[in-house]
Image: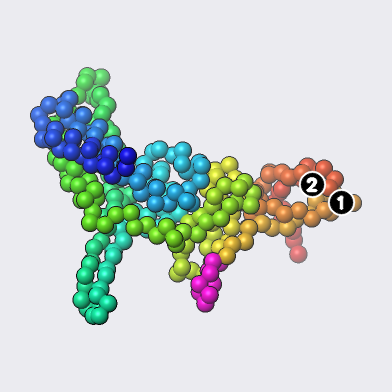
């Protein structure tokens, strides 16, 4: 079973119900379109599966999932353009298509709106309010047109799987990754495990076209005067009040900010 096929089925069933003067029928159509939106976001997430953590994979809410995808890949909600020219003549364009992808803006605009059609509503006197079928029909038909464009995009799932940069977190072992930003020589990457504080400095060597990463850690020493054991602390753990136990003497060290006057 493929997400796109499920999405197409949802869209077809919704279209068969639209337009309608019946509130009940419109609610069913909204339900189908909501599932269709979800399928398209989950399908998009599959393109980045190799760099999604277990935490990410538990996220079912489309708005949160697309936010996460955009952290990994800034262009995750944009379509790629694919152009092919003949080998003999580069001006002889054989193919020029752009992928139609559901954007985060489109998702947030429609998802909550159709969600509101699925709930009973009431006015300030706690009396039930009927759906405004004219406006609901209009909004569902607009969404149906948009979903039809995405589902029938001439090309699909062109996310650059090969271009994803991924490695195992040195602290928790979770998969960390992103679609690298090649326009900068250095950028910071956080572990995607919400319980892990590891972060990494990623460096792009433009000459050799290579990416490398270094754990973002700082050196500190145990506060006990006759110990002074050297310890490494993840940069994101350096917060006022955080603690660490010295591996040599067992002292519980507390991190604190102080001001020293020169
Ligand atoms: Zn981690
Ligand atoms: Zn110590």
Q: Residues within 10 Å of mark 2 (few under 14, many from 20)?
A: some
Q: Along the horizontal axis of the image, is 147 left or right of 169?
A: left
**Rendered image: mark on residue 227:** 1
Residue 58 is situated, as x and y percent measured from the top left of the image, at 46, 38
Q: How many marks?
A: 2
Q: Residue furthest front?
A: 88
Q: CA distance from mark 2 to mark 1?
A: 9 Å
Residue 210 falls within the magenta-colored stretch: yes
Range covered by the magenta-colored residues: 203-211
Q: Do the numbered discs 2 and 1 sit on residues whose CB atoms are within 8 Å? A: yes
Q: What color scheme is it?
A: rainbow
- Disc 2: which residue: 246
Q: Residue furthest right?
A: 226
Res. 134 visible in picture: no
Quadrant where the C terminus lies? bottom right
Residue plotted at (52% across, 56% down): 166
Cβ at disc 2 under 8 Å from ligand 2: yes
Circle 2: element type: loop
Q: Is residue 252 above or below residue 157?
A: above
Residue 249 is situated, as x and y percent measured from the top left of the image, at 85, 45
Q: Quadrant of residue 219?
A: bottom right
Q: Along the horizontal axis of the image, is 10 left or right of 184?
A: left
Quadrant where the N terminus lies? top left
Q: Is 129 or 170 nearer to us in this picture? A: 170
Cβ at disc 1 under 8 Å from ligand 2: yes
Residue 243 is situated, as x and y percent measured from the top left of the image, at 71, 44
Q: Is 241 or 65 nearer to us in this picture? A: 65
Residue plotted at (23% across, 42% down): 8
């Amino acid at each position: 079973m493929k997400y796109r096929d499920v999405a197409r089925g949802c869209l077809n069933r919704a279209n068969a119900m639209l337009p309608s003067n019946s509130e009940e029928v419109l609610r069913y159509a909204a339900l189908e379109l909501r599932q269709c939106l979800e399928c398209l976001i989950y399908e998009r997430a599959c393109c980045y599966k190799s760099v999604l953590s277990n935490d990410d994979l538990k996220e079912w809410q489309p708005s949160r999932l697309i936010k996460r995808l955009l952290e990994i890949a800034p262009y995750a909600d944009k379509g790629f353009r694919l152009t092919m020219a003949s080998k003999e003549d580069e001006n002889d364009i054989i193919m020029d298509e752009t992928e139609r992808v559901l954007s985060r803006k489109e998702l947030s605009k429609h998802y909550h709106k159709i969600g509101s059609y699925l709930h009973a509503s009431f006015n300030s006197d706690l009396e039930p309010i009927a759906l405004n079928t004219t406006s609901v029909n209009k909004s569902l038909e607009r969404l149906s047109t948009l979903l039809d464009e995405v589902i029938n995009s001439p090309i699909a799932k062109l996310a650059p799987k090969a271009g994803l940069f991924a490695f195992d977190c040195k602290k928790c072992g979770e998969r960390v990754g992103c679609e690298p930003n090649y326009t900068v020589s250095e950028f910071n990457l956080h572990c995607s495990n919400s319980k892990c504080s590891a972060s990494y400095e990623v460096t792009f060597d433009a000459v050799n076209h290579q990416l490398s990463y270094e754990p973002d850690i700082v050196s500190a020493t145990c506060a006990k005067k006759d110990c002074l054991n050297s310890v490494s602390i993840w940069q994101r753990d350096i917060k006022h009040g955080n603690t660490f136990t010295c591996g040599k003497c067992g002292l519980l060290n507390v991190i604190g900010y102080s001001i020293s006057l020169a």
